[in-house]
Image: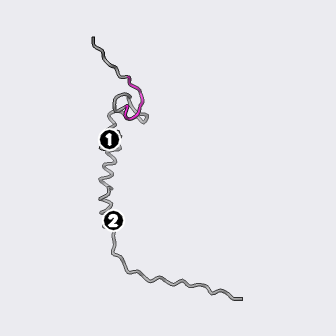
Amino acid sequence: MLISYIKMVKRYGTRSDVFEGLAEKTRGGLGRDDLMISKTGKIVSKKKSMAAKASYDKFGFSKRVERQEDKRVEPQEEKPKKKRRRRKKDSE
């Protein structure tokens, strides 16, 4: 006799539920095909992950350092500060 186990599938669930197949989608509308596991082990949206990687390639740490080095200017001589004139007090 063959016994098949049927998973009870919920309509909405957490990201982990959707990833494991226990739910159809998340409340935000993400399905199994929209999720992936990041290198840190978290379940994340594929779309947002790809956008973040592209953004890092464009504006990442090394790019910011390069831009700062380009903007760096040689220090100039310091000008002596002007002395502030004070009003004389009226003596009555």
Magenta residue span: 8-17
Give the residue at the far right of this rendering. Answer: 92
Residue in the foreground of this view, choosing between 59 and 81:
81
Q: Quadrant of residue 69?
A: bottom left
Residue neighbourhood size for the residue with mark 2, other residues' Cα within 10 Å, grouped as few (<14), some (14–19), many (≥20):
few
| Residue 67 image-quadrant placement | bottom left
The structure residue drawn at horizontal position 31% and vertical position 54%, both measured from the top left corner, is 58
Give the position of the N terminus as an image quadrant: top left
56 shown above or below 29 = below
Q: Which residue is mark 2?
A: 68
- Residue found at x 34% / y 41%: 42
Q: Is residue 10 magenta?
A: yes
Q: Position of residue 40 (x, y in %)?
A: 32, 44
- The correct choice, above or below, for 32 with respect to 81 in the image is above
Query: Can you name the residue that lies furthest to the left here?
Result: 1
Relative to residue 91, is residue 17 depicted above or below? Answer: above
Residue 68's image quarter? bottom left
Amino acid on which disc 1 is placed = Gly
Q: Is residue 32 left or right of residue 90?
A: left
Looking at the image, which residue is at 38% across and 35% down? 15
Q: Secondary structure at mark 2?
A: helix
**Of the image marks 1 and 2, the number of the one nearer the N terminus:** 1
> In this figure, which residue is indicated by the disc labeled 1?
41
